[in-house]
Structure formats: C-alpha cells, structure tokens
Amino acid sequence: QAATPVYPFNFQVVHTSGLEAGYVCPKGELPAIAEPSPTNGELVPLRVLSYNLDWWSIFDQGRAAELHVYKGTQGNAVVEHIKKNVPFDVMAFQECIDVHWLAQKAGLAEDYEVRQGPEEICVAYRKSVWDSLDYGFSYVGEDTRAEFWRKRGAQWLRLRHKSSMRTALVINHHGPLPVASGGVCGGMGTAHNLLALVNDKGVRGDAVVIAGDFNAGQSSVTIGQLKKRLTSAIAGSVYAGVDNIFTNLGPDRIVGRVNIGTGGSDHAGITATFNL
C-alpha cells in the first residue's frame, strides 16, 4: 500500500505531457497473420532469448533509478547469467535501462548490435549472422490508472540472415498492468495491437517471433487471443507464465525450448530455437 501514491503521479506526468497516446484500443476481428516461407530443406536456426532483468532490484540494488547505481558496479548475477548462456541470435530484454552498459559488462559489445528502446525495453542481435533491415518502437497500450507505471509498447526488429537471405521479424514486448488485465485496452485490444504491428512492420514470408514479459499469464485473455493466431513456443514458469515467446512458425519448426533459470532476477529467462 505504501507504494500506491506513485501511480497517480506517474499517470499525471504521462497524461499532462501533451504527447499523443500513440495507440488506439481497437475493436473487431483479430488480424490474420501470414504464413512464413517454407524451409526448402535448408536449416537456418534462429535462437531467441526473452528475459526480464529485474533492473531496479538487481542492477540498481533497490535504489532510485536516477542514481544510476549500476554504473558504479562491475556487473551482477544477471549479467553473469547472460554470459553463461550466450550465444543467441536475438535477445529481448524487459526492465532494461542501459543496454550499452549491459552489453559491455556481459562481453557482448563486439558480437552484438544493441538497441535501447523507450519504456525500459531493449534488444540485441548477433551482427555477424544477421543484417538489420528495419527497426522501431510502437505503443500498443498502457497501464490502467489504478496501477500506472507507464505506457506500453513493442520494439520491432526485422532481420535478414546473411548467408541464406531468410528474413525474420522479432518483436519485444513488456505488457500492461495490472497483471492479466491487458491494461486500458484489455486483453483483446492488446493482442489485437500486437498482431496489427506484425502486419504493419513485417513482410509476407517473414518468420515472426513475439517475445517478452506480457504481464499476462496463461489463463489471461491476452495470451488466449494470441494463441488463436500464433504458436506458443515456450511459456515461463513464474507469475502464472507471463513470460512468453510466440511465432507464426508451425510446431515442427520449433527445434528447441529451454528455461535457463532466473540468474537472480524475479523472472526466468526463456529461449526458443526456430528453423527458418
């Protein structure tokens, strides 16, 4: 209860900024998602990690974010956990405030291109294997006023495999609060906006991956609606399965799924490997 006064303050700061919401709460049928290109017998692996880093607790040691406590450290258990489990083709992080610092401390800077997004999400991709075709961030909703931390969006990264020329659209999402509510747009609206983003930023034939902490467990409307259009590659083990990786690839093209454990975070990292 002591923390609740921050919600009205957060809401006021965002909603008196003069900026447009950047999203609408849609109605109607869920968007259909195009099928990916067939494999044609060639094995092109795409290994994706989704990991909520628990930045405030692990990196900033429970101190105010503006103090940047992490900058005075040499790393932490989560950084070591990432180092122990690489390589990945794409890493999607939530509660990520400084991906450049993270990449340096985890020894990723030479092999990975990183992108810091708004709203504390970030991505990294293996630049020796993939070329970036397009990148951006779009809002898809926000927390309700009762538990308002922020507006919620998704980073999107369209990649092309250097040798095979196969393409993939990877989306990183940290979902709205309260947990399982879908935020102001509800679970149906949040799922609709994520699927619409796939169609807006992807190209027919792309392999599609949506990864993140959806703040929505396996019995939520958000997850249920996404499962109507996408294949669930893996779900996490904490908070009723809020961490998820979805794809438009069929189950036969999901060739690996691993829960790598928490590494000290309050979420476990989850990985899925796909055959493009």
Image: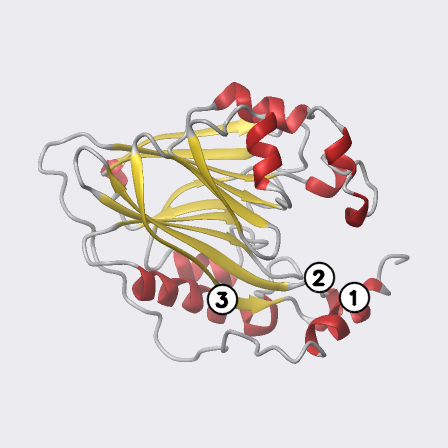
Is disc 3 surrounded by few (<14), some (14 to 19) or many (20+) residues within 10 Å?
Answer: many
- The image quarter in which residue 51 lies: top right
Badge 1 amino acid = Tyr
**Residue at the limit of the structure toward the front, as seen here:** 110
Q: Closer to the camera, 273 or 104? A: 104
Amino acid under disc 2: Trp
Query: How far separated are the C-alphas under marks 1 and 2?
Result: 6 Å
> In the figure, 209 relative to 101: above or below?
below
Residue 245 x, y percent position in the rendering: 43, 44
* x, y percent for residue 19: 61, 77
Regarding mark 3 in the picture, which secondary structure is present there? Answer: helix
Say which residue appears at 50% left-offset and 27% top-offset: 108
Q: Is residue 176 left or right of residue 46?
A: right
Side of 145 where 45 appears, left or right: left
Is label 1 in contact with label 2 (beta carbons under 8 Å)? yes
| Other-residue count near label 1 (Cα within 10 Å), few / some / many at <14 / 14–19 / ≥20 | some
SS assignment at label 2? loop
Q: Is residue 66 left or right of residue 195?
A: right
* Residue that appears at 86% across and 57% down: 3
Q: Are marks 1 and 3 in contact (CB under 8 Å)?
A: no
The kind of secondary structure element at disc 1 is helix
Which residue does the numbered mark 3 point to in the structure image? 190
Q: CA distance from mark 1 to mark 3?
A: 21 Å
Residue 7, labelled with which disc?
A: 1
Pointer 2 residue: 149
Label 2 crowd (10 A; few <14 / some 14-19 / many >=20):
many
